[in-house]
Amino acid sequence: MNSVIDLHGKSVAVYGLGVSGLGALKFLAHRGLEKLVIVNKGKPEEWKNQLPHLNSSFSHHYEEGSSQAIDELAAVDFILLAPGIPRTSLTLRKALENKIPIWNELELASRFFSRPILALTGTNGKTTSVSFMAEVMKHLGVNAFVGGNIGRSFLEGLESGEKFDLALLEVSSFQCESLDKMKPCVAGILNLFPNHGERYSVHEDYRQAKWLLCHAQGKDDHFYIGPGCKEPVFKPSVQIHRISEEDSQRLSEEFNLNELKIVGAHNRFNLWFCWQMLKAFSSKLKRDEEEMKAAFQKAIGTFSGVANRIEYIGENKKYLIYNDAKSTNWEATVTAIKAMREKKLPMTLIIGGQLRGHNDTPSASVMEELKDCEVFLFGESQKVLRTINPYWRCFEGFGEIISHLKENEQESKTQEIILLSPAFPSFDQFSHYVERGDFFREKARELLKDV
């Protein structure tokens, strides 16, 4: 457990009112603060009346960038910074000069949490991995708080009063930047590839931010790293365990993968990484490794993946359906196609969405990946795509596609994969890729019912 902090009589600032900021406000409202400073974009009269559980006698509201906000942040005991706001923000300049602690809500929550913490960061696959480990915990019969960069904020989970046996956290690089003494007993970096160029001018800054997750760990803790991590600029005290892609081939030796629903070599690596972390974590939960292994095996058969990310929808004798609605570029779609090829089944690929104005036409290498697929087109991008291949079929939307599949069922001894992996943004027909995925899931289940 980290050093507990007494909040009574303290002056605290919350900068940024996203999921983490609102969760922090709910937590801080009943902690006996002397003063609560809230800084957000826009004029306070536009947002302060919508904040929950706040007593105006101790809360003070300021617009980001204003001189009042700059001065107030420089005079509090500590600041809780939203992950989307960089520490280089000019609004923080005086606070940094005054050496005011700048944390995030994970750091503060960890000061009030006495149970073990398992934390994972990385570039790709961390949401799937954390969600899978949460499934393992369900089969193990323990109640895990699951959050951080996914789901609800850690502080909101603590404020709920629910009793948790552990915390399972997905941590972004932005959140890693504002950790201080949060000390997960088991943590890791799943992989590291160039990302978030809008925040980090060089990849090295992004990489070093990820390493901060292990900064407070000690010699009795464990830290696992995958491809691309290299070395941190500081000397960690924690045990470092490197996991290679070759190591992950042992997954099939340890576990029966016949019922595995998530596909692709990348997901098998992710599961192997999870297993290494969970083995180390089992003793922290006072559970036998064999108990953990049995729960892991059960999770292999029940975990359908993360919603909208090569998500298993269901199957029958005719169709095997996956939802990759989050795909908004050709690279993501090719990744999904390659993963599906492991099934060695015929594939119908559903692509389409809002035109970007650049990279709309598939490259020669992408066309090579598409050549064995039956392709259904929908949405605005049909304007560009329908002339590329005369065998690609055009549809108004998912409803028409599902109707077509129903009307053209053919008796076959072989299943057919139906894969939605759009390769384009969703905004021509939907407000968000999540809405796109939800609508497809609903329609696809109609197809499974009817066959």
Image: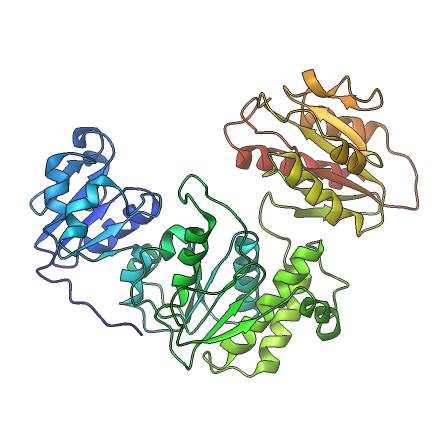
User: In what quadrant of the picture does the N terminus appear?
Assistant: bottom left
User: Is 311 left or right of 48, judged from the image as shown?
Assistant: right
Residue 346 location, quadrant: top right
User: Is 5 left or right of 187, judged from the image as shown?
Assistant: left
Q: Is residue 299 or residue 109 the one in the foreground? A: 109
User: Is 278 left or right of 84, judged from the image as shown?
Assistant: right
Which residue is drawn at the image coordinates 68% and 28% (left, top)?
398
Which residue is drawn at the image coordinates 51% and 81% (left, top)?
287
User: In what quadrant of the picture does the C terminus appear?
Assistant: top right
Colouring used for the render: rainbow
Number of marks present in the image shown:
0
**Above or below for 305 versus 49:** below
**Above or below for 309 versus 182:** above
Whether residue 56 can be seen here: yes
Q: Is residue 81 or residue 440 the one in the foreground? A: 81
- Provide residue 235's location: percent of width, then percent of height: 39, 72
**Above or below for 407 versus 13:** above
Q: Is residue 350 or residue 55 the one in the foreground? A: 350
Whether residue 315 can be seen here: no
- Provide residue 169's location: percent of width, then percent of height: 43, 61
- Provide residue 42's location: percent of width, then percent of height: 23, 30
Which residue is drawn at the image coordinates 20% and 54% (left, top)?
28
